[in-house]
Image (cartoon, rainbow, N blue to C red):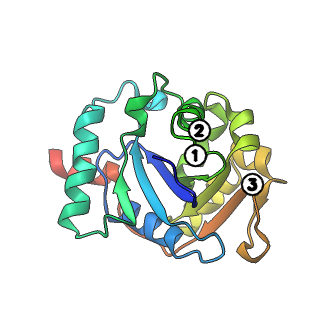
């Protein structure tokens, strides 16, 4: 497949996917100045920071994303699940995206999307400095004010301080921060409620 329009790739463990994730995807699609045409939800093969956490396989989490989108009657032409991770031999997101550019000829049509909570350890990701220089990134916040302040004062935020655009009207390329309404749900809380 070759896309001649902008796509958003929203990565995460999605263990499990929930309405907060859907809120992030929909918020990105509403950004008229960016004009994303599709958002692909891409579960990670293995989150390096969660190696000691027992979690469903990549295939099971991908199936969970598919089932969730069907259950909530999501427009499959706008928000869809992605098997992109499975076509790459890599685990680190930067290298998966580089493989995508080669295999699918996506060129510069990719916007990487991530929740603000993921930023806490972003600086530890493989290829971090190449990542922030080679890919456009949309950071979307849906947490409480306290959570936002904590992460915006993290090591990652200090490294990115002069690279983040907080005003979408002035955003062209690079890293964009979007502040959305608080959504009181998390994968962790869902897992805890499931086991109780």
SS assignment at label 3: loop
Which of 84 and 150 lies nearest the eye of the viewer?
A: 84
x, y percentage for residue 110? 59, 51
The residue wearing badge 1 is 106
Could you tell me residue 84's position as x and y percent?
42, 39
Of residues 141 and 106, the one nearer the viewer is: 106
**Mark 1 vs mark 3: which is more N-terminal?**
1
Would you call the spot at circle 1 few (<14 residues within 10 Å), some (14-19), or many (20 or more)?
many
Residue at point 29% right, 69% down?
A: 74
The residue located at (54%, 29%) in the rendering is: 92
Marks 2 and 1: CB-CB under 8 Å? yes
Residue ID for mark 2: 101
Q: Residues within 10 Å of mark 3 (few under 14, many from 20)?
A: some
Along the polypeptide, which appears first: circle 3 or circle 2? Answer: 2
- Label 1: state its secondary structure: loop
**Helix, strand, or loop for circle 2?**
helix
Q: Which residue is mark 3?
A: 174
Work out whether mark 2 precedes mark 1 in sequence or the reverse, and give the earlier one.
2
The answer to whether one can see residue 46 in this image is no
Of discs 3 and 2, which sits in the foreground?
A: 2
Q: Relative to residue 49, is residue 78 depicted above or below? A: below
Viewer-closest of 133 and 117: 133
Q: Relative to residue 111, is residue 193 drawn left or right?
A: left
């Amino acid at each position: 497949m070759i896309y001649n329009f902008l796509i958003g790739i929203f990565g995460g463990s999605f263990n499990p996917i929930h309405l907060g994730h859907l809120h992030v995807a929909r918020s990105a699609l509403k950004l008229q100045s960016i004009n994303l045409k599709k958002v692909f939800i891409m579960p990670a093969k293995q989150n390096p920071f969660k190696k000691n956490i027992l979690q469903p396989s990549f295939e099971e989490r991908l199936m969970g994303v598919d089932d969730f989108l069907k259950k909530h009657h999501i427009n499959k032409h706008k928000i869809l699940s992605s098997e992109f991770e499975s076509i790459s031999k890599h685990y680190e997101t930067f290298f998966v995206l580089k493989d995508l550019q080669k295999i699918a000829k996506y060129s510069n049509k990719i916007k990487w999307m991530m929740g603000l909570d993921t930023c806490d350890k972003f600086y530890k990701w493989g290829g971090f400095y190449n990542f922030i220089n080679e890919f456009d990134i949309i950071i979307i916040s849906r947490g409480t004010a306290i959570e936002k302040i904590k992460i915006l004062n993290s090591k990652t935020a200090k490294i990115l301080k002069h690279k983040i655009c907080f005003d979408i009207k002035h955003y062209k390329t690079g890293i964009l921060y979007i502040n959305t309404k608080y959504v009181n749900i998390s994968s962790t809380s869902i897992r805890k409620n499931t086991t109780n």
